[in-house]
Image (spheres, grey):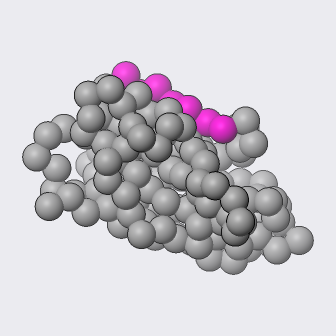
């Protein structure tokens, strides 16, 4: 049974940094991609960053380019989202997603992903 568990959320002042972690385990087939999504109150869930594992290619939403970095630690089997220069508009529930679907490329389409964590909340105060 696949499990996806996020950690690292919290509250921070604008301009600060946080690092989210994601542990995904129990895959029968190889993971093709992993990603981070977020959902702010009253808004739809959006793709923030993604990683196509086979090629090592990454995706970032325009709103986070230059501030967020997605990476993985293969030895620890962890996915990270380093978030710098945080803004109040980054406040949201952040979700880690994983996929063993062959067509997943680590993009912002949540339909590429078939496993989701419960989310970790990030609050950025102005």
Would residue 51 be seen by someone viewing this image from the given angle? no
Which residue extends farthest bottom? 11
Residue 89 versus residue 60 in the image, above or below: below
Nearest the viewer among 46 and 58 is 46
Q: Residue at x 70, y 69 (%)?
A: 41
Hey, which quadrant is residue 121 in on the image?
A: bottom right
Q: Quadrant of the N terminus?
A: bottom left
Which residue extends farthest left? 28
Image spot of residue 111 (x, y percent): 42, 41
Residue 105 versus residue 37 in the image, above or below: above
Would residue 9 be seen by someone viewing this image from the given angle? yes
Which residue extends farthest right? 126
Residue 99 versus residue 86 in the image, above or below: above
Image spot of residue 96 (x, y percent): 44, 56
Q: Residue at x 61, y 36 (%)?
A: 60
Which residue extends farthest top? 55
Query: Magenta residues, as a range?
Result: 55-61
Image spot of residue 33 (x, y percent): 36, 37
Answer with left or right where residue 9 lies relative to residue 5: right
Q: Residue at x 71, y 44 (%)?
A: 64
Nearest the viewer among 39 and 122 is 39
Answer with left or right where residue 118 lies relative to residue 11: left
Answer with left or right where residue 75 lies relative to residue 37: left
Q: Is residue 117 magenta?
A: no
- Count of all numbered marks drawn on residues in the image: 0
Q: Residue at x 89, y 71 (%)?
A: 126
Nearest the viewer among 92 and 56 is 92
Image spot of residue 72 (x, y percent): 40, 45
């Amino acid at each position: 049974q696949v499990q996806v568990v996020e950690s690292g959320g919290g509250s921070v002042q604008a301009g600060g940094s946080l690092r989210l972690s994601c542990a995904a385990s129990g895959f029968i087939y190889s993971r093709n991609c992993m990603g981070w999504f977020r959902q702010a109150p009253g808004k739809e869930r959006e793709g923030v960053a993604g990683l196509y594992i086979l090629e090592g290619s990454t995706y970032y939403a325009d709103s986070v380019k230059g501030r967020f970095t997605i990476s993985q630690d293969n030895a620890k089997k962890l996915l990270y989202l380093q978030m710098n220069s945080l803004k109040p508009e980054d406040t949201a529930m952040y979700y880690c997603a994983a996929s063993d679907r062959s067509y997943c490329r680590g993009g912002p389409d949540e339909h590429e992903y078939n496993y989701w964590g419960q989310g970790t909340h990030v609050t950025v105060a102005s």
